[in-house]
Amino acid sequence: MQHDTLSYPLEGVPAPGEAREVAEGVYWLRMPLPFALDHINLWLLRDGDGWTLVDTGYALDEVRDHWRAILADVVGDAPVHRVVVTHFHPDHVGLADWLCDELDAPLWMTAGEFFMANWVFHDGGIGDFARQDRFFRDHGLPDEKLVPLTRRGNPYRRGVPSLPGQYHRMREGDELRIGTRSWRVIVAHGHAPEHVSLYCEADRLLISGDQVLPKITTNIGVWHTEPEGDPLGCYLDSFARFTDLDPATRVLPSHGLVFEGLHARIHALRAHHEARLAEVLEACAAGPVTAADLLPVLFRRELDLHQLRFAMGEAIAHLSHLWHQGRLRREVGGDGVHRFHAT
Ligand SMILES: [Zn+2]
């Protein structure tokens, strides 16, 4: 069987409040999100006499209602043995505390994701708007664009109203026994500190989280909390942990459709970033540029304020990756602005 293109083996998508079986004992749930990205996929795994949940959804009343319907219809009185959360983003961890509490189930996360969630929840970084403004100004965003970015409260808590106070740690290479299957924990970096995917080799199933998505590219951004980071390098390097997976693997992603063609998709994601890096190098060859200068090069459309923040993070990530590789030089001017030059 050829896997140079993606295929989508299932018809349609589950309705909200429906659990659709996609492999024996593996159920696909699709929950609404209050963003342009309008849904997230969650997974319910049969686990002996009970269940394991993977990811929880953004804290909206309608998502809680869909969960109640699924718990009543599918889970019933069976125990939930664990709630696995792939990473700290609000659409994944948002209802973890509510579910762990309702179901009397432990939370399973990596240390990096659990502590990142707690740090952000308690205003670490995300509440430091002065530092965030300075960071974007240093990357060339003019003050009039910074002012509207000044926000109200801690936006993370809108999607994550509370967090469990304890967790069970997952680590790279752990094997999770879930019912009759063994799932290998694969930790990836770049999109989040210690993002988890789960791979069942025997049945060629990959719960990929946000690391591998079929249509959209995963957001990779540099933020003021780690201003000299190279998350794009981390993200691309992490694909090495997926290269030995069976080409016929069925991929269960957090957004979009269940698909086959894992290696073709990884190849396309690498090529996408290579093309963008080439565009950045070309722009820098014509003279020094800031991240803000790159926005019209990398994003050929109007950006709203929410998108502007992510676009800046992405632009800085591509510049920083080339700088870390020694393919660009960085100069910090007397105005504090970071300008990148061809070497
Ligand atoms: Zn995410």
Image (spheres, rainbow, N blue to C red):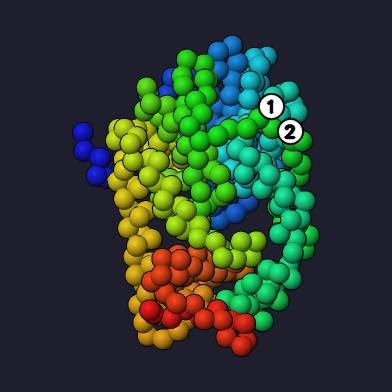
> Looking at the picture, how far across and down is residue 160, in whole percent?
71, 45
Residue that label 2 marks: 166
Q: What's the amino acid at mark 2?
A: Gln
Q: Given this view, does label 1 or label 2 mark the residue nearer the observer?
A: 2
> Looking at the picture, how far across and down is residue 298, in whole percent?
43, 71
In this view, 272 is above or below 61: below
Q: What's the amino acid at mark 1?
A: Pro
> Looking at the picture, how far across and down is residue 335, in whole percent?
62, 87
Residue located at (46% from left, 58% from top): 232
If the image is split into quadrants, where does the N terminus sit?
top left
Answer with left or right where residue 58 lies relative to residue 257.
right
For label 2, count other residues whose C-alpha is less than 10 Å away and answer few (under 14), some (14-19) or many (20+).
Answer: few
Residue located at (46% from left, 66% from top): 324
Q: Is mark 2 within 8 Å of ligand 1?
A: no
> Could you tell me how many numbered marks the image carries?
2
In this view, 85 is above or below 144: above
Answer with left or right where residue 51 lies relative to residue 328.
right
The residue positioned farthest toward the top in the image shown: 49
Residue that label 1 marks: 106
If the image is split into quadrants, where does the C terminus sit?
bottom left
> Looking at the picture, how far across and down is residue 281, in whole percent?
37, 74
Q: What secondary structure is marked by label 2? A: loop
In this view, 176 is above or below 30: above
Whether the residues at callouts 1 and 2 have beta carbons within 8 Å, the answer is yes
